[in-house]
Image: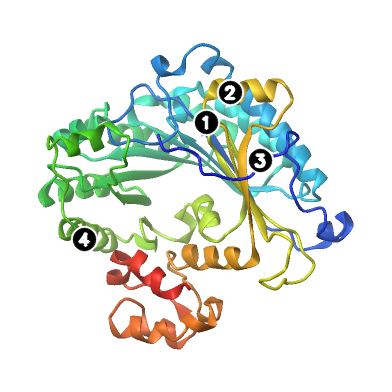
């Protein structure tokens, strides 16, 4: 698992650093920014060889980390978050989206997930029509558990399918039977939940035909949302060690590009349009609003060990790049569930560190994230010194020329393949 980033200390009470930015009354009079909640559930039945997320199996937890008590622990952070945001004048806004991720959230009993959601609703209130998603493995749900979630207010489930090909799943060390996926999708739909399927492409040993088979299996379920991510083998993972020893061979960039292009082609033909580089939906109503909130720079509070949060500074008027007050604050929690629980039990924030973003840094992040979505971002959002780069990117087929004429930066399919390179040319 990766180390936490470096940062400054988080106050024991979790106070946000916005005391100098206007009065509470002024902040409350502003147009409220959208607010979401992420709940990290750090438990898995096994650790997949490619995974570097902050997750733990039963053998890795050690003493003092009680999975059965996790809902109670998470609700302590919900209470802390409600107080901290209220003290900053940012507590009087409903939650637009809630996302339970992990790990495998559905390793907890459905009643525990429902209890955490009730706590979020009690703290802030869920916005009318709010989106509530949980990730799940296909073998971690039943028709009954999915009905409990739907009755509790969950609206979506995102299944980690990864592949439909047994030898690819074996390389990834995924434990579910791919034949179970259509059943899990049907159970979720019968419960009234929207369904997304997550795929990974570029697994060692995966052929283009294997990838096509996975895409066709996804489309056969009729789901309205698909995520497809290129495999990234991170240092410190079991798979990284296997690659280093020569036991596994990673595909080259051309193979990855061919698989992305095939995904975009088949998904588009089936009526699912891209709305973010790695995500396709049958229509705007099926896009994951929680993830869109990240890409649009909305506020969110991350509950759980290792979870990250971000809140923009409340301000009555735009500030200049050289302004001394932060434009926002990002912080992250301690990683181990035992330490996380201990801090909350003692009444302290579980924050491990934080960074204060200058207006210039916040603007840079707006570009980094905004370029990835289909709506793109305004050319005027770019630094003046980088706006001239748009014409060259259009000429190379990486940006949409019609959109550029209309004053927006929108990636073409080729641009999506080279999104990181495009961003480098658009940022100082």
Relative horizontal placement of residue 165, taking residue 3 as reference (left or right): left
Residue that carries the numbered disc 3 in the rendered image: 9
User: How far is mark 2 from mark 4, CA to CA?
Assistant: 42 Å
Placement of the N terminus among the 4 image quadrants = top left
Instruction: For label 2, count other residues whose C-alpha is less than 10 Å away and answer few (under 14), some (14-19) or many (20+).
Output: some
Relative horizontal placement of residue 201, taking residue 32 as reference (left or right): left
- Asked where in the image residue 296 lies, by quadrant, the reply is bottom right
Look at the image and name its color scheme: rainbow
Relative to 178, is 218 above or below? Answer: below
Residue that carries the numbered disc 1 in the rendered image: 335
User: How far is mark 2 from mark 3, CA to CA?
Assistant: 16 Å
Please state the horizontal and vertical placement of residue 322, each as a whole percent of the image.
68, 71
Rendered residue at 74%/39% (across/down): 82
Please state the horizontal and vertical placement of residue 265, each as a whole percent of the image.
23, 63
Q: Earlier in the sequence, mark 4 or mark 3?
A: 3
The label on residue 339 is 2
């Amino acid at each position: 698992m990766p180390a936490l980033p470096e940062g400054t200390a988080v106050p024991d009470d979790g106070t946000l650093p916005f005391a100098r930015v206007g009065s509470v009354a002024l902040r409350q009079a502003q147009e409220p920014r959208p607010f979401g909640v992420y709940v990290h559930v750090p438990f898995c039945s096994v650790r997949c060889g490619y995974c570097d997320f902050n997750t733990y199996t039963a053998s890795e937890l050690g003493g003092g980390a009680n999975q059965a008590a996790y809902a109670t622990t998470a609700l302590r952070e919900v209470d802390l978050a409600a107080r901290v945001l209220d003290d900053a004048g940012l507590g009087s806004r409903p939650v637009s989206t809630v996302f339970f991720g992990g790990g495998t959230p559905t390793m907890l009993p459905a009643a525990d997930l429902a209890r955490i959601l009730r706590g979020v609703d009690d703290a802030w209130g869920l916005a009318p029509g709010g989106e509530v998603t949980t990730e799940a493995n296909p073998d971690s749900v039943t028709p009954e558990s999915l009905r409990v979630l739907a009755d509790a207010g969950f609206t979506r489930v995102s299944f980690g399918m990864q592949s439909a090909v047994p030898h690819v799943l074996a390389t990834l060390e995924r434990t579910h039977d791919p034949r179970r996926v259509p059943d899990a999708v049907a159970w979720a739909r019968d419960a009234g939940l929207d369904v997304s399927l997550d795929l990974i492409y570029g697994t060692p040993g995966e052929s283009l035909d294997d990838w096509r088979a996975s895409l066709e299996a996804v489309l056969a379920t009729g789901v309205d949302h698909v995520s497809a991510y290129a495999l990234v083998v991170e240092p410190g993972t079991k798979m990284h060690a296997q690659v280093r020893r020569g036991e596994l061979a990673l595909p080259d960039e051309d193979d990855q590009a061919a698989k992305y292009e095939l995904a975009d082609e088949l998904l588009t033909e089936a009526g699912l349009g891209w709305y973010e580089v790695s995500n396709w939906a049958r229509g705007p109503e099926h896009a994951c609003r929680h993830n869109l909130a990240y890409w649009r720079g909305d506020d969110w509070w991350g509950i759980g060990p290792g979870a990250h949060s971000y809140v923009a500074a409340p301000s009555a008027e735009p500030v200049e790049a050289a302004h001394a007050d932060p434009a926002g604050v990002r912080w992250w929690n301690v990683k181990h569930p035992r330490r996380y629980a201990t801090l909350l039990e003692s009444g302290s924030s579980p924050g491990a560190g934080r960074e204060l973003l200058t207006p210039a840094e916040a603007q840079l992040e707006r570009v980094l994230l905004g370029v990835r979505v289909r709506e793109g971002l305004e050319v005027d959002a770019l630094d003046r010194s980088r706006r001239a780069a748009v014409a060259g990117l259009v000429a190379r087929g990486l940006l949409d020329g019609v959109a550029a004429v209309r004053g927006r930066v929108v990636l073409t399919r080729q641009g999506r393949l080279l999104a990181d390179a495009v961003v480098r040319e658009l940022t100082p």
